[in-house]
Image: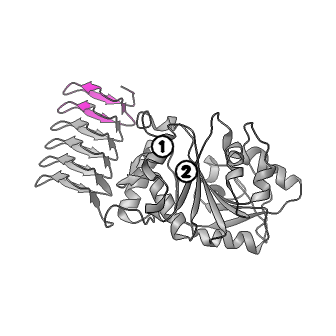
Amino acid sequence: MHDVEAVVLVGGKGTRLRPLTLATPKPMLPTAGVPFLAHLLSRIQAAGVRRVVLGTSYLAETFSDAFGSGAQLGLEIEYVVEEHPLGTGGGIRNVAKHLSADNVLVFNGDVLCGTDLGAVVDTHRRTDADVTLHLVRVQDPRAYGCVPTDDSGQVLEFLEKTEDPPTDQINAGCYVFRRSVIESIPEGRPVSVERETFPGLLAAGARVSGHVDNAYWRDMGTPADLIHGSADLVRGVAPSAALAGPVGESLVLEGAEIAQGALVFGGTTVGRGARIGAGARVEGSMVFDGAVIGAGAVVEHSVVGTGSRVEDGASVRDTVIGDRAVVGAHCELRDGVRIWPDVVLPPHGVRFSADV
């Protein structure tokens, strides 16, 4: 697909993932051993696309510092900074002058997906579409906007969230645009492709196609989804060519130490230089670089931030612990607790569903 370019929108602040995103953009959070965006870039490269434009905004320099020219990934990466929030459509329009291909793959940078990108482009070409949307079938579409299609794959309408959705097809955040359509989006103001661009194309009689499949798909916008998605990458449930090691029950990175008798499983990543104490049990979690899990501690479906400590005998479930924080011995955290960076919790405390 050398005649196709890609655009990845990575400008969001990731507020639902705080405190993890206070100093790191959401697409750059370490996920299965590498920045999350590396997984998407690896799939773009594997599909035969060679040129990628990143639409950045929040902590924009983080992306170029990590990926540079893209040569190490087999890509040519260009960075375009969005000075003011422009929405999905405005963000796409903001990079238009940096594009040259007739067809452009566009991605939301916070979605983990296993669809065949070549097949999405093939649908776009076969149906001679102005825009093609990747649509994924989900078990419960009520939490999403629905996108019904007819027998030919033509999109019929764009529906907001409803308790009685007429289809299980939802917008998966991956599109193919004719470049001329991108150039027709109003410039210099916020535009939503979902609420303005796509409905406007339908009203004007344009061909908007849907490519429907049952591929792996997860929006990584919440801590629970980030943790689950990372575990799926480690276990090989979600596809990626960017993993830092073989798939399995755990991914243990360079310099990490796991004491005898510790159990580390469920797709857990143990970061560089991290330590897991004797008898600890770590399931389906993200242990960032330099973190320490004490002897006999239990960590389940949680994030333990860079350089943070979970002391001996503590219990941490469905929790996000910020960088350099300390959870005291025999402390119990559960049910969505978020610990801000550098906070020190005393031993034997119990906290449910609160920010600290």
Q: Residue furthest right?
A: 204
Query: Would you say 212 lies left or right of 342 here?
Result: right
Residue 11: quadrant of the picture: top right
* Colour convention of the picture: one colour
Q: Which residue is mark 2?
A: 109
Q: Residue at x 34, y 43 (%)?
A: 303
Image position, residue 171 (x, y; %) = 66, 55
Regarding residue 161, the answer to whether it shows in the image is no
Upstream in sequence: badge 2 or badge 1: 1
Query: Would you say 351 lies left or right of 136 here?
Result: left
Number of numbered labels in the structure image? 2
Residue 280, numbered label:
none
Regarding residue 345, the answer to whether it shows in the image is yes
Are discs 2 and 1 less than 8 Å apart at CB? yes
Image position, residue 53 (x, y; %) = 60, 53
Magenta-drawn stretch contains 338: yes
* Figure quadrant of the N terminus: bottom right
Q: Which residue is mark 1?
A: 26
Q: What is the magenta range?
A: 326-355
- Spatial CA span between label 2 and label 1: 9 Å
Q: Residue at x 44, y 37 (%)?
A: 21
Question: Is 183 in front, or is 334?
Answer: 183
Judge whether 259 appears above or below 302 on screen: below
